Image (spheres, rainbow, N blue to C red):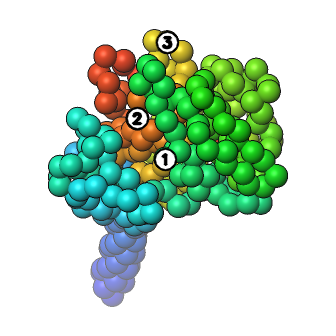
Amino acid sequence: MKNNNYDFHESNLQLIALAGLFFLVLSIGYATANIGLALSNLSRAQTPWQNQGTVEFIPGLKTVGELPSGGLLSPSDTAYCLEDEDPEGCSDKTAFHIPKGNTGKAGQCGTIIQQAHLIAPSLQRNKTDLLDSLNYNLKNCNYSTDIYSEGYLPTYFIIDAYNLAGFHELSKENPGHTLGLNLYNWWKSQTKKYKFLPYSTSAIYQYANGQQDLTGCVIFISQPSGVHAGIINSFQLVNQNGDGVLSILQSGVKYFIERYEVVGWKIKNLTLNPKEPNKVAGFGCLQ
């Protein structure tokens, strides 16, 4: 009788031990699953340029698949024609078609990029073959660009585009706005309304996915001769790897539109003139 009780007691202890072991294994499995899920979520949260060797579909990124090409376009078209060897000729049917930007910040009298589209085609060449003449007086929002036979600086193009849209903080009478380096430093010092964005792959990625619209923002480019400034027109994203073309509008240079190749969300420091190496310093935008 005692042996039976002992056997029964021993069996109970074994059952209790097995049950404890079962719950221990179950707890370890649950914890392991949670750790795996957390790591998976962390991996997904990484930005595309952090994921080395992996290419996944990223919601919100609209790609063109292939850069549109064709021949000459009229000023009323919604795109610019750009041929690398002769940007103003576009006789080749394979010339690039750069869409005219139509977003960005809007003032009381339209968007900044709309005004840039009006100024750019009105620019004329001077004796040194640079587009620094403005032969048509553009008026909008109680502001007038005036006419320039020469000396229409890149900063004038920016100041006029912003004022024509209704943003009157910039002035051609202010030396702090008319020199590229000064305008760059002015933008970096602002804390209200105007904001400066340092150049980074994140900025280009956020432009592509709609988080930060750079259309109409100023792009500051460090050159051996100083700081050049233009207005961002559009970004054509070819694939989700971050490859595409960023185009800008500008004055005081040979061509009013220029395109920068973007590879892996990085703007390549090459322009149509490889003899002038450039480096993007940052972007000037509105809040």
Q: List the residue tagged with mark 2.
A: 255
31 in relation to 84, above or below: below
> Circle 3 sits in a helix, a strand or a loop, which is it?
loop
Distance Cα–Cα, label 2 vs label 3: 18 Å
Q: Amino acid at mark 1?
A: Pro
> Which sits earlier in the primary sequence, circle 1 or circle 3?
1
Mark 1–mark 2 contact, CB under 8 Å?
no
> Which sits earlier in the primary sequence, circle 1 or circle 2?
1
| 1 or 2: mark nearer the eye | 1
Q: Amino acid at mark 3?
A: Ser
Q: Residue 152: give x, y in percent of width and height.
A: 60, 29
Q: Residue furthest left?
A: 93
Along the horizontal axis of the image, is 284 left or right of 62? right
Image quadrant where one finds the N terminus: bottom left
> Which sits earlier in the primary sequence, circle 2 or circle 3?
3
> Circle 2 sits in a helix, a strand or a loop, which is it?
loop
Q: Residues within 10 Å of mark 3 (few under 14, many from 20)?
A: few
| 1 or 3: mark nearer the eye | 1
Q: Residue 198: give x, y in percent of width and height.
A: 56, 33
In front of the other: 4 or 149: 149
Q: Residues within 10 Å of mark 2 (few under 14, many from 20)?
A: many
Distance Cα–Cα, label 1 vs label 3: 26 Å
Q: Amino acid at mark 2?
A: Tyr
Q: Residue at x 37, y 64 (%)?
A: 62
Q: List the residue tagged with mark 1.
A: 121
Q: Residue 160: give x, y in percent of width and height.
A: 68, 41
Marker disc for residue 183:
none
160 in relation to 70, above or below: above
Q: Residue at x 29, y 22 (%)?
A: 274
Along the horizontal axis of the image, is 94 left or right of 58? left
Q: Residue at x 46, y 31 (%)?
A: 125
Q: List the residue tagged with mark 3.
A: 225
